[in-house]
Amino acid sequence: MRLQLALNVNDLDAAVAFYAKLFDAEPNKRKPGYANFAIAEPPLKLVLFETPGAGERLNHLGVEVFSDEQVHSAARRLKDAGLQTLVENETICCHAKQNKVWAREPDGLRWEWYHVTRDIETPAWRCC
């Protein structure tokens, strides 16, 4: 598993250039208005959404896992802990089909546990 940090950026090209240098890595996926980096060290999935003028730089946080069972396990654990969750199966997000569970922390920050089941070509990437 690896932590995900999803940011709203004003200029995707400038952000990609900066983060490529910062982490010495090239984007894992690049689409119009969207890029992500799958960084090995430190284990990080950095997601960039081109959203000029966004009021918040932080879009959401997440934990990328590598099996559906890990998503289901997280959903059960969060529910058993009394947290309100939203489960999304086979949702299309970030140019990929995903299974995920969402939870909000007390100040409203959104967290997701998710598994990418396959990459797809789609313009529907602003689903987060």
Image: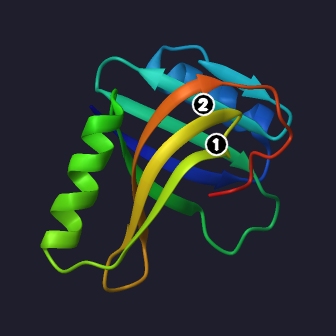
Q: Distance between the residues labelled 2 and 1?
A: 6 Å
- Determine the image quadrant of residue 55: bottom right
Can you say which quadrant of the picture contains the C terminus?
A: bottom right
User: Label 2 crowding class (10 Å Cα cut-off): few <14, some 14-19, many 20+?
Assistant: many
**Residue 63's x, y, as percent?**
34, 44
* Point 41% across, 21% down: residue: 39
Nearer to us in this view, 111 or 25: 111
User: Label 1 crowding class (10 Å Cα cut-off): few <14, some 14-19, many 20+?
Assistant: many
Nearer to us in this view, 76 or 114: 76
Residue of label 2: 36
* Point 59% across, 14% down: residue: 26
* Point 62% across, 35% down: residue: 97
- Determine the image quadrant of residue 93: top right
* Point 81% across, 46% down: residue: 124
Q: Which mark is residue 48?
A: 1
Q: Are marks 2 and 1 in contact (CB under 8 Å)?
A: yes
Q: Residue 69 carries which label?
A: none
Q: Is residue 75 above or below residue 114?
A: below
Horizontal side of residue 49 vs 122, given as left or right:
left
Horizontal side of residue 90 vs 85, given as left or right:
right
Can you say which quadrant of the picture contains the N terminus?
A: top left
Q: Is residue 45 above or below residue 40?
A: below
Q: How many labels does the image show?
A: 2
